[in-house]
């Protein structure tokens, strides 16, 4: 109410002194920014919605209608406009109006007595993401904790992965997936090397550059545009010299103008991480829209062959299906190992609403009513660029001036400007196609409206995921017509190259091949050649034809007919386009129809089945007979037996923030539990053959070091020399490549307070008292420091009883700790495990 009272006063102050950061609630912040700082862009309808949002928020908070006196001047909404926005004029005066906002109960939605705008007005917190104790290296990013436990386990899985490994990171939205790509580069800050991050949109590359600007004073986004030419030249030079710590770029730029710089970087051993963000696009949209997403795999393999350093590959996504996982392993599984880290829960923030419209005109009427009622910011998605353009123009004409457009045809310069305005609260509505929003950092989006039926449930869920990233409730509304069903089916039926047409294209390409000298069965095949000499094929659009030829080669590669290779380029060569692709024949019968039927057809069928399943689930969602959580979990659950390749699985924590089925059953939202997770247990054999410590360990790969019972729980109470002995001992274990240290909180603080001890070292720390399952520990050489108490901590007892640990463990125990089995005797008098006294150990290792 204090913020509400302040707004009451500000509206009639002559020279108000106010800034958005004086308010906590996002609706107040947005109104202050728009009304007091961006007045020139504020239309009357924009203003009406912003005021309505504040009134509805206060009414929900106080559980009673709240009124507000507003100016009655020419630049404020008229009584008619207020009423069109669900706001009643209670009293009209010469110098002002007293208004109230009403809950929204549209007659065209089955509300079951629940106002459609209830959750986005009351803004309840809807997730339980809680910070988790951080590892010492987080200090390089200015952090002391992880955003969530699943983020911690994902990063531990990444940093403990062996060289050359490929890891799919399947993390729910809001848990900090982007940080998984950023942190490894920060740890490499003082070394020569580059982390390459492939992102699907220019918007995302620019947004990631902004996020990383606090760590570097040089650009990290490699995107097109005349204004970026000098910047891009600097990035290319820095990559070659090993000075570009991280770069965000598109698949197309990666494969063209960044080819030579990355080739040189690989030859010099500078490549550290190869990362693809939104990796589901490799399987989900790559076939139909952007072949470059699938060509990346061949380029990565080329870089691996060139590289002196076996870099790691990370594939990041929040929406991995079984088909997607199998595709990723097929394309990125070599040289291996290949694993998936998954901690998936459905989004708790969105409440889902669905309305079937009679026609486009009826949909537009309902959309305008919706926009008059729902708070800002919000996104409206369409499937076609022309639909987005038409809708944008109609909204501007209707009076929503704080509206912008983003499609695949938006120029880079305009994209960058629009993103900046979106993030600085100068825009309230974005009309977009599916390209917008991927990874763009705007956490407070309150609604996503679909003025279409997406071609599959996967795309719909991803786009809804643009809202509620601040953890507060948001709303999804889908407005569709019968014609949209046909359009969705058409988009879903990806025209995967048919056998006859595919062979026609392949025959033409193979006929125009250039033999690679000295390389049997390797050829350069033209990808610009027409599939036939018929009139329609000769006149085919050149870029479209080239894309289809590349898709043909990709499908042949997936099916085992050819290997899709990548060609080395001269270091001095300027890129001017490539009309050929390098391939190697794997099946000598590649021109036979029977072989295509045998090998190509199963790949086409697999893709078709996955697409049709996702479309069928979209239809199930539209029917409003099954809880939304059940529909989404059906798509994203990955069972061990469900695929041809990877046996990793993904369980989905089912959560419904509200849907037609749950409202009908009067089910209320229940705060979800935290998703369970544990880091990948990589096979570390051969990676930690520390010569000195191996001499001390038993056959069980364990050793116990007994320290004096008199040691205080707080090591700071020791004298300076003794404190230094303990620190030197821990430093010695770090040098012996022990990466995991388990202690109670007080002891951990003693060691981590010394910033030099673990500086930029990949060392994991676990609080002993908060960890009960040994399986949750990373599979790494581990030091456990039991506090000086007389009783065993439970997880340490289990560790001693385990028959196979799979990791080297050094356990520090108090000298007088009692045997947990027989009372009255010391554990050190009965244990058969290799053990030493603390001082004896220090002398042996020279401390």
Image: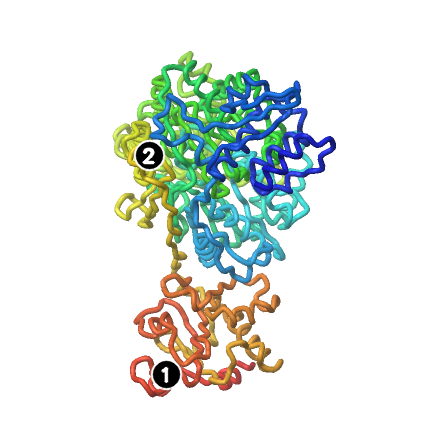
Would you say residue 97 is visible in this rendering? yes
Please, is residue 735 above or below residue 110 in the view?
A: below
Q: Position of residue 418 (x, y in %)?
A: 60, 30
Seen at 31% across and 46% down, the residue is 645
- Pick whichever, 68 or 518, lies toward us: 68
- Pick whichever, 599 or 165, lies toward us: 165
Query: By what rule are the colours in the image chosen?
Result: rainbow
Name the residue at the right extreme. Answer: 15
Please, is residue 716 above or below residue 626 in the view?
A: below
**Which mark is in front, 2 or 1?**
2
- Pick whichever, 56 or 625, lies toward us: 56
Pointers 2 and 1 in contact (C-beta within 8 Å):
no
Q: Quadrant of the N terminus?
A: top right
Please, is residue 689 above or below residue 396 in the view?
A: below
- Pick whichever, 102 or 109, lies toward us: 102
Give neighbour class at mark 1: few <14, some 14-19, many 20+ (Cα, 10 Å).
some
Q: Quadrant of the C terminus?
A: bottom right
The image quadrant of residue 796 is bottom left
Secondary element type, mark 1:
loop
Dot placed on the residue nearer the N-terminal end, 2 or 1: 2
Judge from the rendering whether residue 227 lies leftward or rightward of residue 423; answer left or right: right
Name the residue at the top extreme. Answer: 535
The image quadrant of residue 44 is top right
Q: Position of residue 430 (x, y in %)?
A: 53, 27
Give the number of the disc on residue 380.
Answer: none
What residue is shown with label 1?
Answer: 818
What residue is shown with label 2?
Answer: 663
Secondary element type, mark 2:
helix
Q: Position of residue 642 (x, y in %)?
A: 27, 43
Q: Position of residue 284 (x, y in %)?
A: 39, 34
Judge from the rendering whether residue 455 lies leftward or rightward of residue 518; answer left or right: left
């Amino acid at each position: 109410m204090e913020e509400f009272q302040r707004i009451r006063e500000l509206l009639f102050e002559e020279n108000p002194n106010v800034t958005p950061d004086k308010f906590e609630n996002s609706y107040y912040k947005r109104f202050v920014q728009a009304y007091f700082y961006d007045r020139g862009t504020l239309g009357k309808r924009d203003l009406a919605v912003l005021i309505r949002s504040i009134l509805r928020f206060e009414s929900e908070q106080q559980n009673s209608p709240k009124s507000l006196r507003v100016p009655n001047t020419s630049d404020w909404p008229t009584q008619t406009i207020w009423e069109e926005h669900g706001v009643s004029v209670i009293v009209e005066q010469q110098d002002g109006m007293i208004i109230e906002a009403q809950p929204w109960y549209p007659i065209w939605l089955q509300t079951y007595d629940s106002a459609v705008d209830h959750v986005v007005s009351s803004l309840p917190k809807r997730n339980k993401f809680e910070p988790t104790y951080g590892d010492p290296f987080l200090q390089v990013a200015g952090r002391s904790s992880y955003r969530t436990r699943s983020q911690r386990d994902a990063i531990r899985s990444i940093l403990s992965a062996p060289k050359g490994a490929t890891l799919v990171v399947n993390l729910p939205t809001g848990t900090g997936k982007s940080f998984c790509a950023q942190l490894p580069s920060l740890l490499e800050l003082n070394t020569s090397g580059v982390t390459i991050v492939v992102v699907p949109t220019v918007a995302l590359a620019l947004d990631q550059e902004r996020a990383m600007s606090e760590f570097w004073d040089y650009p990290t986004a490699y995107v097109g545009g005349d204004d970026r030419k000098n910047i891009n030249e600097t990035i290319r030079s820095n990559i070659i010299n090993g000075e570009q710590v991280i770069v965000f770029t598109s698949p197309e730029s990666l494969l063209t103008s960044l080819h030579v710089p990355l080739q040189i970087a690989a030859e010099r051993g500078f490549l550290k991480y190869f990362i693809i963000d939104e990796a589901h696009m490799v399987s989900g949209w790559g076939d139909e829209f952007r072949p470059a997403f699938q060509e990346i795999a061949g380029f990565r393999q080329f870089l691996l062959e060139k590289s002196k350093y076996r870099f790691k590959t990370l594939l990041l996504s929040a929406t991995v299906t079984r088909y997607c996982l199998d595709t990723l392993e097929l394309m990125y599984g070599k040289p291996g190992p290949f694993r998936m880290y998954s901690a998936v829960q459905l989004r708790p923030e969105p409440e889902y609403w669905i309305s079937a419209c009679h026609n486009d005109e009826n949909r537009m009427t309902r959309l305008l009513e919706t926009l008059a009622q729902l708070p800002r910011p919000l996104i409206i998605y369409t499937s076609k660029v022309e639909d987005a353009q038409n809708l944008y123009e109609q909204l501007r004409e209707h009076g929503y001036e704080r509206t912008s457009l983003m499609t695949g045809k938006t120029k880079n310069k305009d994209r960058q400007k629009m993103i900046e305005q979106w993030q600085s609260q100068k825009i309230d509505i974005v009309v977009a196609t599916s390209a917008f929003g991927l990874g763009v950092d705007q956490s407070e989006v309150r609604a996503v409206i679909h003025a279409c039926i997406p071609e599959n449930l996967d795309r719909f869920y991803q786009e809804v995921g643009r809202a509620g990233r601040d953890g507060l409730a948001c709303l999804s509304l889908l407005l569709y017509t019968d014609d949209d069903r046909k359009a969705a089916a058409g988009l879903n039926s990806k025209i995967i190259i048919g056998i006859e047409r595919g062979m026609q294209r392949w025959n033409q390409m193979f006929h125009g091949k250039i033999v690679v000298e000295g390389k049997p069965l390797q050829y350069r095949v033209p990808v610009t050649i027409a599939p036939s000499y018929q009139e329609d094929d000769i006149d085919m659009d050149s870029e479209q034809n080239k894309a289809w030829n590349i898709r043909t080669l990709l499908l042949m590669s997936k099916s085992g007919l050819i290997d899709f290779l990548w060609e080395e380029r001269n270091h001095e060569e300027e890129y001017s386009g490539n009309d050929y692709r390098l391939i190697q024949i794997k099946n000598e019968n590649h021109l036979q129809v029977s072989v295509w039927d045998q090998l190509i057809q199963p790949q086409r069928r697999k893709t078709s089945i996955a697409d049709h399943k996702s479309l069928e689930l979209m239809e199930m969602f539209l029917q409003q007979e099954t809880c939304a959580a059940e529909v989404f979990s059906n798509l994203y659950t990955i069972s061990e037996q469900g695929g041809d390749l990877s046996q990793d699985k993904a369980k989905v924590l089912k959560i419904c923030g509200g849907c037609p089925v749950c409202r009908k059953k009067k089910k209320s939202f229940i705060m979800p539990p935290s998703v369970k997770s544990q880091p990948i247990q990589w096979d570390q054999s051969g990676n930690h053959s520390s010569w000195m410590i191996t001499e001390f360990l038993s056959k069980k790969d364990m050793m116990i070091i007994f320290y004096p019972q008199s040691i205080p729980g707080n090591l700071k109470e020791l004298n300076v020399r003794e404190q230094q002995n303990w620190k030197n001992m821990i430093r010695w274990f770090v040098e012996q490549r022990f990466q995991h240290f388990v202690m109670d909180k007080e002891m951990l603080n003693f060691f981590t307070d010394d910033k030099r001890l673990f500086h930029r070292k990949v060392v994991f720390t676990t609080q002993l008292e908060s960890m009960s399952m040994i399986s949750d520990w990373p599979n790494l050489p581990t030091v456990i420091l039991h506090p000086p108490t007389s009783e065993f901590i439970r997880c340490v007892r289990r560790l001693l009883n385990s028959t196979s640990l799979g990791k080297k463990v050094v356990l520090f125990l108090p000298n007088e700790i009692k045997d947990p089995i027989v009372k009255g005797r010391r554990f050190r008098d009965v244990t058969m495990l290799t053990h030493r006294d603390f001082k004896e150990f220090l002398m042996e290792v020279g401390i």
